[in-house]
Image (cartoon, grey):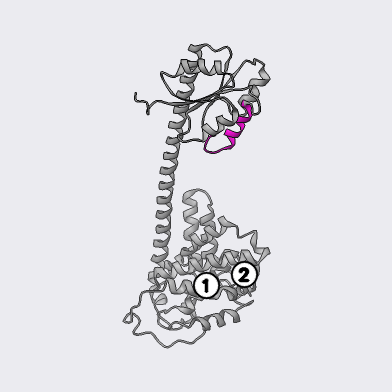
Amino acid sequence: MSEHERRLLLLVDDTPANLSLLNAVLKNDYRLRIAGSGALALELARRLPHPDLVLLDVMMPEMDGYEVCRQMAADPALAHIPVIFLTARTEEEDEARGFSLGAVDYIHKPFSPLLVQMRVRNQLELYDARERLRRQNEWLEQKVGERTAELVKVQDATMLAMGVMAELRDNETGMHLKRTQEYLRLLALAARERCPDYAVELDDPAIHWMSKSAPLHDIGKVGVPDAVLHKPGPLSEAEFALMKHHPTYGRDIIVQVEQILGEETSFLRYAREIAYGHQEKWDGSGYPQGVSGTAIPLSARLMALADVYDALISRRVYKPPLAHDKAVEIIAKGKGTHFDPVLVEVFLEIHAELHAIALQYADPADPGLYHDIREAAESYQGAHI
């Protein structure tokens, strides 16, 4: 073994004879640094490369071994280095104090050369084993993190695919799903910051899962006839009655998934709330239940606002897009009737940020796609959004 490959030990003792003995016992197998005081020991311990092990006298003037050990343990760069105390004391209290400070072993004076060699070798082997285990754990954590990230991507892609499946039947795009997801997240964050009454319900996990589940808000449209979804104009009363079933269809689909899983998850809970409740209105005039106010889940109230805003500014088979300012005006008029008044106030404070999201995730231009779109009214009233 070359000199560079040999392990590095730090020997600390204020008695030259003890240092001479330790040097004679260990110099053939290890590289050595020698300190005659606690202060010098810390200086040499901090010098790169750090020692692999410290043999540390307990009783020294000015700074004793306990203090050296304490300062090493408090230094992230040195805390991992094993320390063997050298002492003439045999009281249990002294040894307990040393172990409590981080020491790994004791060697009692006068030294036995063979015992010193064995204790040093054993502690280095234990240290190496701990390091191998630490590196293995880090590797495993990295792999688990990578695998978790992959699963999250698969989950997100699956959710988006399910949402797109419903939206494509309605002549909409995946960008609508991304926009509404981002609108909901931004509205929820802003509501938490500005509305103390909503803050408890809008913690980080809640906002995370609400926004994750937002793409499933219209999954129930898979149960609505194409003739209704694709009609380029106002729906008849009978057609609108069919459209009004889609929140119930969405809820039922998600309930079936929960039954297959055998448990309720936060993600599916919010997906169910949003799918079933996003067409409800604050004044009770919505569907399918006709509930009002805070009886509508907060997740659904957020989704309603996000969904209507995007519907207003987007081109649909039955209408051209409205300008952002006009959409803001319509949302403001819906305060306390269609929408939660608190959330409308939040919307009005951050509408410019929502507009930026709309521009960032705008649909690809396709001027030939909607060549047969009819002229639509500037209000969303009566439109199947």
Can you name the residue that lies furthest to the front here?
Answer: 16
Q: CA distance from mark 1 to mark 2?
A: 30 Å
Mark 1 packing: few (<14 Cα in 10 Å), some, or many (20+)?
Answer: some
Q: What span is colored magenta in the figure?
A: 65-78
Q: Position of residue 331 (x, y in %)?
A: 57, 79
Identify the main secondary structure in magenta: helix
| Foreground of the two, 291 or 191 | 191
Which residue is denoted by mark 2 in the rendering? 291
Secondary structure under tag 1 reads helix
Q: Position of residue 140 (x, y in %)?
A: 42, 39
Disc 1 to disc 2: CB gap under 8 Å: no
| Foreground of the two, 204 or 161 | 204
Residue at point 34% right, 25% down? 2
Q: Amino acid at mark 2?
A: Val
Residue 70 visible: yes
Name the quarter where the N terminus is drawn. Answer: top left
Residue 381 visible: no
What is the number of the mark on residue 353? 1
